[in-house]
Amino acid sequence: ELAGIALEEAQLREGPCIVRMETRAAGDLLVRYNRGDYVGVWNEIKSHEALGGELLEEARAVANETMMRVARGIDHLSHRLANFGWKPLYGALRTRPGAEHQDVLSQIEVISGAFLPVSLRAFWEIVGGVNFIWDYEIGEAPNLGLDISMDQMDPLCVDPPETASGVFEDWEYQRLGVNPEFSDPFYLPLAPDDLHKANISGGGPYGIELPFLGADPIFMGEAHNLSFVDYLRLCFRYSGFPGLEHHTERTDVREFLKVMTKDLEPF
């Protein structure tokens, strides 16, 4: 009861949240992106708290080009991991998108009341899903030439769309007010946290909050507090194992990264 009163008072003090939607396209974002201004273009897109109209379409074009590069990079990394004998905990190293995924995307948008952020939609439509978590149920992981435990590696994982359907019932209860303890935003889990990836009891899953009217939401739960695209950049920098950033002084880690990240495209 006290918490409810305090929440109402805080909401009254804060007032309504007014989001200004930007619809005017820059017109050259994709050209600049393809010329190599990857970070600058995404920073410009992310500077708008809400996208619509021509700008939304232009942002989608940039997101699609970005995720085509990400898809090719994940294929490179997956092939190299497979050569080590690496097996994913569930699904495939890369789960390719399917026509059935569109129904899930549409349902998320209906429940959350807004378009999916362009970065996540492009990832799901072009990449599909990725899972570099070692299948600890079959035993010890193959030797990658690294003397580092799995709980320090935080392997890249972004679940494909169909896994989101597991939260739809909870979201419906939330949307309809069946459970008054919960309200917007909706939390969309996309990956286990770093400890669960190593079969250790940990915290909540990594994910994003919806609705998000901008282009590239924060990948929440993960330690760096980066946007989704920036998180993928971090993962690629460390060959799909961003936990390795804490061990770059080691010769074995530097050699592993040199081999694994060869020929990855910037995005």
Image (tube, helix red, strand yellow):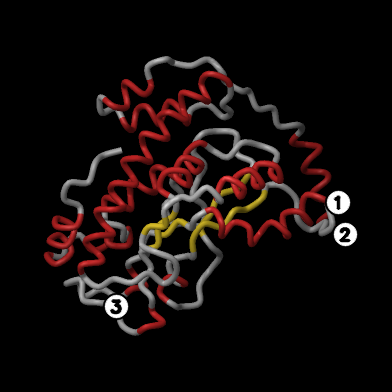
**Residue 56, percent from left and from top:** 53, 25
Q: Residue at x 41, y 35 (%)?
A: 64
Q: Nearer the viewer, residue 157 or 127?
A: 127
Q: Which mark is nearer the camera, 2 or 3?
A: 3
Identified at 31% across, 82% down, the residue is 140
Secondary structure at numbered mark 1? helix
State if disc 1 and disc 2 touch (CB < 8 Å).
Answer: yes
The answer to whether residue 177 is above or below residue 191 is above
N-term-proximal mark, 1 vs 3: 1
Q: Nearer the viewer, mark 1 or mark 3?
A: 3
Residue type pointed to by label 1: Ile
Image quarter in which the N terminus is found = bottom right
Q: Position of residue 51 (x, y in %)?
A: 56, 26
- The reply to whether callout 2 and callout 3 are in contact (CB within 8 Å) is no
Q: Counting other residues with Cα less than 10 Å from the Cα at mark 1, is it few (<14), some (14-19), or many (20 or more)? A: few
Q: Which residue is mark 2?
A: 1
Give the Cα separation between the discs numbered 2 and 3.
50 Å
The answer to which of 48 and 17 lies nearer the viewer is 48
Q: Which one is nearer the viewer's eye here, 194 or 29?
A: 29
* Disc 2 secondary structure class: loop
Q: Amino acid at mark 3?
A: Ala
Frontmost residue, 183 versus 134: 134
Q: Does residue 37 sit above or below 220 in this rendering?
A: above
Above/below status of 141 relative to 78:
below
Q: Which quarter of the rendering shows the C terminus?
A: top left
Q: Which residue is mark 1?
A: 5
Residues at marks 2 and 1, CA–CA distance in whole angstroms? 6 Å
As drawn, 266 above or below 150: above
Q: Position of residue 263 (x, y in %)?
A: 17, 46
- SS of the residue under disc 3: loop
Q: Toward which corner of the image does residue 62 lie, by quadrant?
A: top left
Residue 113, position in %: x, y?
Answer: 70, 39
